[in-house]
Amino acid sequence: MLPKQHRLLRSRDFARVRRRGRSTSGPFVALYVASVRPPDIRVGFSVSKKVGKAVIRNRVKRRLREAVRQELPSIRPGTDLVFIARPSAAEASYCEIVAAVQLSLRRTGATRQPAEATHA
């Protein structure tokens, strides 16, 4: 589970990130990234009914949350992220989702430089 300080919760925040942020898309997830005030890193997830029924959607969200939680130390401070699951994410393995999250973060420039990263 992501710590509460790292959660993006309000609908207007999701809309702002989607409207003003950079984006990238892959086979399993789309990612929107927007800059905010420096110490904050907030992440939101959107999984529509196109992905599957509730059990499947919740599994996809859990996998995405865990993949992002592992990447938090490498994410640049001052970033809001919105991950949108694609229907193909329902059949993806956890390893494939982790790889998709890492690739999306690198493509949008949301990660720190290798020398800048700190591991917790």
Image: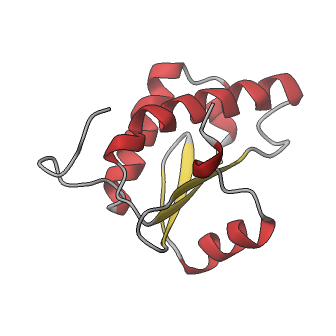
Query: Is 18 on the left or on the right of 67, as rendered?
Result: right
Please tell me which residue lies in front, 55 or 52. 55
Q: Position of residue 86 (x, y in %)?
A: 65, 43
Total labels drawn: 0
Q: Position of residue 103 (x, y in %)?
A: 36, 44
Query: Is 100 on the left or on the right of 80, as rendered?
Result: left
Picture residue at 32% right of the left edge, 61% below the top: 109
Picture residue at 69% right of the left edge, 34% below the top: 61
Q: Is residue 50 visible?
A: yes
Please tell me which residue lies in front, 104 or 7. 7
Query: Is 94 on the left or on the right of 116, as rendered?
Result: right
Q: Quadrant of residue 77?
A: bottom left
Q: Is residue 83 visible?
A: no
Q: Quadrant of residue 16?
A: bottom right
* Quarter of the picture holding the C terminus: top left
Instruction: Give the farthest residue toward the bottom.
Output: 20
Q: Is residue 63 above or below residue 118?
A: above
Picture residue at 56% right of the left edge, 45% below the top: 29
Q: Position of residue 23 (x, y in %)?
A: 49, 65
Instruction: Give the farthest residue toward the left.
Output: 115
Q: Is residue 3 above or below residue 25?
A: above
* Quarter of the picture holding the N terminus: top right
Picture residue at 80% right of the left edge, 46% below the top: 48
Please tell me which residue lies in front, 115 or 109. 115
Q: Position of residue 15 (x, y in %)?
A: 71, 72
Query: Is 76 on the left or on the right of 88, as rendered?
Result: left
The image's colouring method is secondary structure
Q: Is residue 118 above or below residue 34?
A: above
